[in-house]
Amino acid sequence: MASLVLLAGCAADVLDKSADFDRHRNSRIVQPFDRPDKIYFDVRFSPEYPADDPAAEEARMTWLDGWLKQRQLCGAGHEVASRRPFDYLEDNPAGYQQRWEVSCLAPAGR
């Protein structure tokens, strides 16, 4: 029984130290069907990652880069075209607080 408690404790330590844990908890990436030229990056602000903190903003940019790399999108780079709060009536069951519209940059020579 003690080994199960020790194993559970180790698993919790690994989960807390995962580089992707905060990214998955506080953001997501969406490719809208009606706007194939855009990518939505939805974020949630928390006490660890407040809206007006430069370090938190840097973390969110790292999360965006991680999502794009994981989905193999925007190989030539990207730009954040706009940021806006979610509208009250907009579909947002996960409670994200801000939506960024992201555009992929064209590869060089195109």
Image: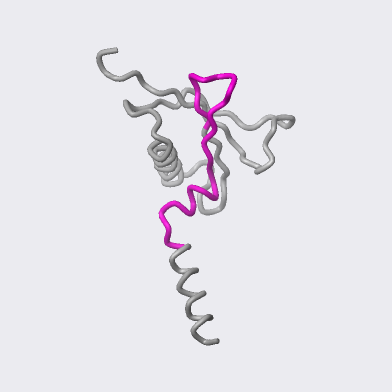
Specify the segment rendered in magenta: 16-40
Q: What kind of colouring is applied to the model shown?
A: one colour
Instruction: Name the residue located 68 percent from the left edge and 29 percent from the top edge.
Output: 87
The picture places residue 56, in percent across and down from the top left corner, at 46, 46
Q: Nearer the viewer, residue 90 or 68?
A: 68
- Looking at the image, residue 32 sits to the left or right of residue 62; the answer is right
Q: Position of residue 67 (x, y in %)?
A: 44, 39
User: Which residue: 55% across, 40% down?
Assistant: 43
Identify the residue at image location x=48%, y=19%: 37
Vertical position of residue 29 compared to residue 8: above or below = above
Residue 50 in magenta stretch: no
Residue 95 on image: x %, y % = 66, 42
Q: Position of residue 97 (x, y in %)?
A: 61, 39
Specify whether residue 19 is painted magenta: yes
- Quadrant of the image containing the C terminus: top left
For residue 92, above or below residue 4: above
